Image (spheres, rainbow, N blue to C red):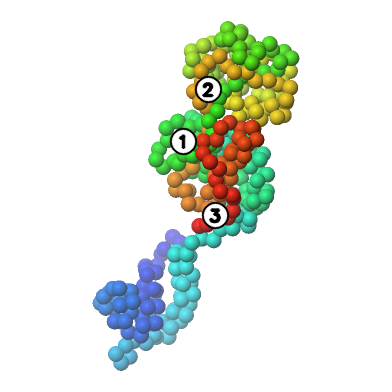
Amino acid sequence: MNSIYARDLDLNLLRVLLAVADAGTVTAAAARLYVTQPAISAALRRLKTAIGAPVVARHGRGVVLTERGARLVAEVRPHLEAIIRLAVEPPRFEIRTTDRTVRVGLADSAEEWLLPPLLRLLEREAPRMRLICLPVQFRTVREILATRRVDLAVTVADDLPHSIARRPLFRGRFVCLFDPRFVRLGSRPTEGAYLAQQHVIVSYNEDLRGIIEDYFGRQRRVRCSIASFAGLGAIVDGSAVIATVPEIFALHVLRQRPHLKTAVPPFRFPKSGMDLLWPTALEDDPACRFLRDAISQLVYRLSQRGEAATPVRRPTPRLRSPRP
């Protein structure tokens, strides 16, 4: 057993000893600590038993410290004062000097368009902060947040427990992404023209079904099913397949491959979007709060430049070191 726990020593007894040393009498110490005189006397007896030596001796109407008691007071006082300050004073946090490592869960599509500008922002604002990024998606994010494998997440999410906070980041639409050199689709294809194309889909179920099959009950000619958005732009580029993707991801691909085109699908999709999620236990964590505000501000800036979908809320104030 660890020696710290092996001894039957209540550390609150040391606080009592310091009060007696400062007050000079058991009665005055009891008044300072808002307890009774017998409680102070009992505490001194317990301390004597715990360390095997008396710490005070009677002297006139008061008490004086024994040699053991005086040495104990001298050694304990600076440590006890430091512990009290640590417990009651707000923690200091400087964003430019913090070396905190924050674990971030990212939907693979968000990793494509969000992570590069986020890292550039941290290079300016928090140059020593580090990120560990883990893949999440709507089926896994609940468990990953609940088990604290990540400190925050950016993804699509369904119903969540009260222990997980949610901040909507943006809402957008789905678009068809294609290479006009190989696909004749137009800007608003009919359902027949859309279904006649060959498709590449992102499926987390490792099958040939996506949102069109599951939500609308239509069957596409799926040429390829992949598990990540990462290679989607390269697959569409130079091929006769189309991809139906969130508009924010399509805009990211078009910045890299401006010769590709988008079209409006012939289905009325529900508004798609992403949320910023985090455990409520980290609500006041200054590093996590800074990173959440940074992500919200980035999404707003991207939307202002036409590089992202419509943000859900106004931008946060200019980033600065959060107050604890």
The CA distance from mark 2 to mark 3 is 41 Å
Provide the secondary structure element on which disc 2 rests: loop
Which amino acid type is shown beneath numbered disc 3?
Pro
Q: Which residue is mark 1?
A: 142
Q: Position of residue 194 (x, y in %)?
A: 60, 11
The answer to whether the residue labelled 2 contacts the one labelled 1, judged by CB atoms less than 8 Å apart, is no
Q: From this viewpoint, is residue 50 visible?
A: no
Q: Which residue is mark 2?
A: 205
**Left or right, 46 with reference to 290:** left
Q: From this viewpoint, is residue 315 visible?
A: yes
Q: Position of residue 52 (x, y in %)?
A: 37, 77
Q: Residue at x 63, y 10 (%)?
A: 197
Q: Residues within 10 Å of mark 2 (few under 14, many from 20)?
A: few
Which amino acid type is shown beneath numbered disc 1?
Arg
The CA distance from mark 1 to mark 3 is 27 Å
Q: Based on the displayed image, in which of its 4 quarters is residue 34 positioned?
A: bottom left
